[in-house]
Each structure stands twice: as structure tokens, then as C-alpha cells.
Image: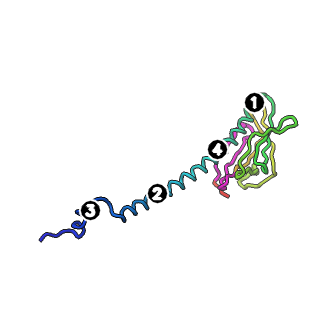
Amino acid sequence: MEVIPLFIGLRRGVNGFTLLELLIVLALIGIASGFAVASVDKLAMRMDERRWQDRTRQTLQAMRNKAMRTGATVAAEVVVDAAEIRQLNDGGRELLLKLPTNFKYELVSASGDTKVALERKAVIYFFADGAMDGQAFDLISPQGRRYELKLAKHTGQVRGRLSDAVL
């Protein structure tokens, strides 16, 4: 007596997949594409954050370079309420960088780890020898991530790093 598995005899004349198998495959494809869309959306937001971090740092670096190139002190103003950086000229204020409405700047104390909001704007002076008056402020993203910008007083180096603190 020959033993035949239960469903083999039923499947011999059937070609293709059953409806249940097709539905399972389609459900798995839908779940996988849902994960892909979510990760692409987060990637786009992170790239936008990175773009504004880089633009802020490059704007400050360009101000330092301008002071060294011209041999004159250059002043910039970081305005918290308007989320912008302006160059102070003779009687004027030229807009250098304006953040989108969902990003903001926050001035912080240069001493210690505590983030204390100081004023609504700060003036940064870039000197001809490459030095500047040290300042520190944060760029805060819509997701609450802080990007710390620290301007070294003696070397004039503009340093930025992503903070561990999230709002």
C-alpha cells in the first residue's frame, strides 16, 4: 500500500497560485512599501535639517573670511525672533540668511552645559586677524533636534555639532 500525502493528489491538475497565496504576497508587498515610504520621508526631513545647518555654518565662515580678506572688522547679527543672520553695514543691515518658519535659533550661555536663553539677538564681530568674539547658539529643527554652533574666540573656528538634547 502506497502512502500519498494528503494534498498532492488535489494539486496535480492545478496550475498557478491560489487566491489566498496571491493575497498574502500582496499584503507583504504593501507592508514593505509602507516601511520604505516612512524611511524616505524621514530621510528628506533629515536632509532639510542638514542643509540649514550647513548654510548657517557656511554663512558664519564666509563672514570670517570676508573680515580676513578686507582687513576690516565685520559684524553680523543673529536675530532669534526673525530666525535670521544679518550683516551690519554702515547704517544698514543686509540679510544673509533667513531660516524657514519651522526652524529657529536660540542663543545660549557660553559657560556650562545649561542652555539658558539670553536675549533676542546677538552681535558677532569678526576681526581681520581671523579671531572673533566667541558666541554660542543653537539651530533647532522642527523635530526638536539641536545643532550647536560654537564660534571659537581666538582661532575664529566655526564649530557645529548635533546635540544629544532633543526638545
Of badges 3 and 1, nearer the viewer stands: 3
Q: Quadrant of residue 135?
A: top right
Q: CA distance from mark 4 to mark 3?
A: 57 Å
Q: Residues within 10 Å of mark 1 (few under 14, many from 20)?
A: some
Q: Residues within 10 Å of mark 3 (few under 14, many from 20)?
A: few
Assign the N terminus to one quadrant of the image: bottom left
Of badges 1 and 4, nearer the viewer stands: 4
Q: Position of residue 69 (x, y in %)?
A: 75, 28
Q: Nearer the viewer, residue 89 or 23?
A: 23
Residue assigned mark 3: 14
- CB within 8 Å, label 4 to label 2: no
State the residue at coordinates (69%, 40%).
158
- On residue 25, which mark appears? none
User: Does the segment drawn in magenta span residue 141?
Assistant: yes
Q: Secondary structure at mark 2?
A: helix
Residue assigned mark 4: 51
User: Does the segment drawn in magenta span residue 16?
Assistant: no
Q: Secondary structure at mark 1?
A: helix
Q: Indicate which disc, 4 or 2, sits on the residue closer to the N terminus.
A: 2
State the residue at coordinates (68%, 38%).
58
Q: CA distance from mark 1 to mark 4?
A: 26 Å
Residue assigned mark 1: 68
Q: Indicate which disc, 4 or 3, sits on the residue closer to the N terminus.
A: 3
What amino acid type is highlighted by mark number 3?
Val
Q: Which residues are magenta?
A: 140-163
State the residue at coordinates (75%, 30%).
68
Residue assigned mark 2: 32
What amino acid type is highlighted by mark number 1?
Met
